Image: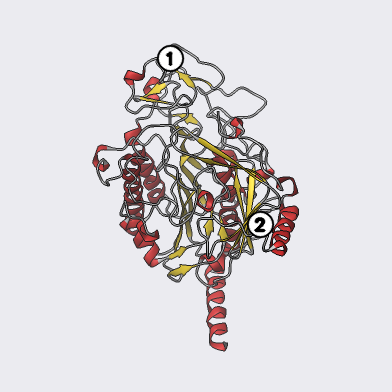
Amino acid sequence: MKHHFLISALVALSTSAFTLAGEKPNILIIYGDDIGYGDFSCYGATGVQTPNIDALAKNGIRFRSAYATAATCTPSRYSLLTGEYAFRNEEAHILPGNAPLIINPERPTVATFLRDNGYSTALVGKWHLGLGSVSEPLDWNGLISPGPKEVGFDYSFNMAATADRVPSVYIENGHIVGLDPADPVKVNYAEKVGDEPTGISHPQLLKVQADEQHSGTIVNGVSRIGWMTGGHAARFKDEDMADTYLNKAIEFISGTKEQPFFLYYAPNENHVPRVIHPRFQGSTNMGPRGDALAAFDWCVGRLVQELKAQDKFDNTLIILSSDNGPVLFDGYWDGAVELNGDHRPAGPWNGGKYSRWEGGTRVPFIVSWPKMAKPGVSDALVSHVDIFASIAGLIGKPLPDKSGADGENLIKALTGESAIGREFIVQQALAQIAIRKGDWKYVPPGSVTQRGGIDQWIETQVDAPGLLFNLGEDPEETTNLAADYPEIVADMQGIIEKVAPEKSSGDKKINKKQLGF
C-alpha cells in the first residue's frame, strides 16, 4: 500500500514539475465522426483493420467506459469545447449549414483557454457550431464572422457544418477558399435558391442515391441537405476531403516551432456522404463505410508520422475519439447496411447515433502521451465534457470564470495514474437524457428515439418509473430491472433532479429542428 502511494506521489510530483518547468505538452484532439465503439480493431472490429489506431492504443491508454456527451454531432462538439452539457443551451442541437454561431464569444472555450496560456491553436475539419450572428444575415462572400477565431482558434480550415449540408465549400480563417467574386454564394434551407439541379429533379446525375432530406443541390454528383447557388470554383470534392484536411493539419503542426500547439482535428470520416478516394476504395469488404474507416486510420498514421518527424510525438497528448455512436444508413444508399456483414459498429452495445442506448454515446477513446502517460486499459468513467477541465489541470491553470461548469478534472485518469473517473455519466440523445452510474443505466420515462432500418425512425414510449439495466450482465439493455431495484431508480432520479430537472422526461415525438432539417 505504501509502495503504491509512493509511486502515485512520484507521478504527481513529476507531472507538477513538468508543468512548472514550462515544458507544456502539445495537445491534439482527433475527433472522428459517427465512429462507433466497435469500429476499430483494437475494440474488436471484424470488418476493418485499423493498425495505426491500434498502435496508439497499445502504447497509450484505451478506455472502455468513455462517452461522448450526446448521440449527435453538434451537441457533442459544443460540450467538448465548452465543458458544458449541450442541453443547457437550447440552440445546441443539430444545426443547418446556415445557422449562427451557438457559442457566445464572450464565454471561454478550451481553445481560448489554451490560446491565452501560450498555445498556438487551430481547427481543421468539421465545425458544425454555427457561423455569423443572430442579428445580421450572414454574407458568405466576405468575412464570415463570428466563427472559430472568435472562440479561440488562431487558425481555422473547416466546412460550415457537415459534408451532407450546403454550403459545400472550405472556409479558411473566415473566407471561402477559392471563391470567385463574380460567382457569389447563396445558401437557403427554407426554400430553393437558383436553378441548379437537385437530387429530386436530376437523380440521374447522382453518384449515390439519397432520401428526400438529402436531395437538395447537387455538388460533385452528391445531393445535399439545403440549397445553394454560386461558388462553383470553390466547391469541394468529397474524394479529396480526407487528404485536404490531413495536409492542413500537417502544415499547422510543422509550422509551430516555438509555441506548444493545440490542434482540434475533426475529419469527416465516417459521416455521410461516404464518397471515398480511389486509393481507399475496396480497402474493406464493407463498402464505403468500411473504406472510410480505413482512410481515417491512415490519416491518424500520417499525423503520428509527422509528429515523430518533427520530434514532437513524445510530448504530444493525443486524445482520439468520436462525436457519437455509429449509423449505417443516414440518408444515402451506399451499401452500408447490405455490406456490414457480422461487423458490430457499436461493439457489444445496443443502439447507435441518435439514441439513448449505450451505442449512441459510448465511443472509442484512446489517450497517447509517451512522455507521461502509462500504457494500459482503463475502465474509468470519462466524458468528453471533462476534457476542458482536465486540460486545465494538466497545465496547472485554474478554469476561467463561467467555463467548464459540468466537467471534472480527470487528468490522472486520462494519463493512467488513476483508475477512478467520474461518479456518473449523463447521456443525451436529441432532447432526452439517460444516466449511467457504476454498472447501472437508467432511462427516465418518455419517448426513446432511434434510427431503425433504411429511412426509418423508431420511437418507443417508456412508462414510469423508467428503464433500469445492469450493463455488466445485460450490455444490450434488454431486461428492465426498475421494479426490482426501486432504491437505485430513486438514486438515478435524484441525479437527474440535481443535474437537469427539466430533463426528467423525454420528448413525446421527434423534433425535426433537432435533426437539422
Q: Mark 1 or mark 2: which comes first in sequence? A: 1
Q: Quadrant of the C terminus?
A: top right
At label 1, which amino acid type do we have? Ala
Task: Give the class, few, some or many, for how many residues have Cα within 10 Å of label 1's Cα (few <14, many ≥20).
Answer: few
Q: Residue furthest top?
A: 195
Q: In this picture, is 65 found above or below 280?
A: below
- Give the quadrant of residue 483: bottom right
User: Measured from the top left, where is residue 257 in percent x and y?
Assistant: 42, 53
Task: Give the class, few, some or many, for how many residues have Cα within 10 Å of label 2's Cα (few <14, many ≥20).
Answer: some
Residue 152 visible to an observer of this rendering: no
Residue depicted at 67% across the width and 63% down the height: 484
Q: Which residue is mark 2?
A: 399
Q: Quadrant of the N terminus?
A: bottom right
Disc 2 is placed on an element classified as loop
Q: Which mark is residue 182?
A: 1
- Give the quadrant of residue 241: top left
User: Measured from the top left, where is residue 200 in percent x and y?
Assistant: 42, 18
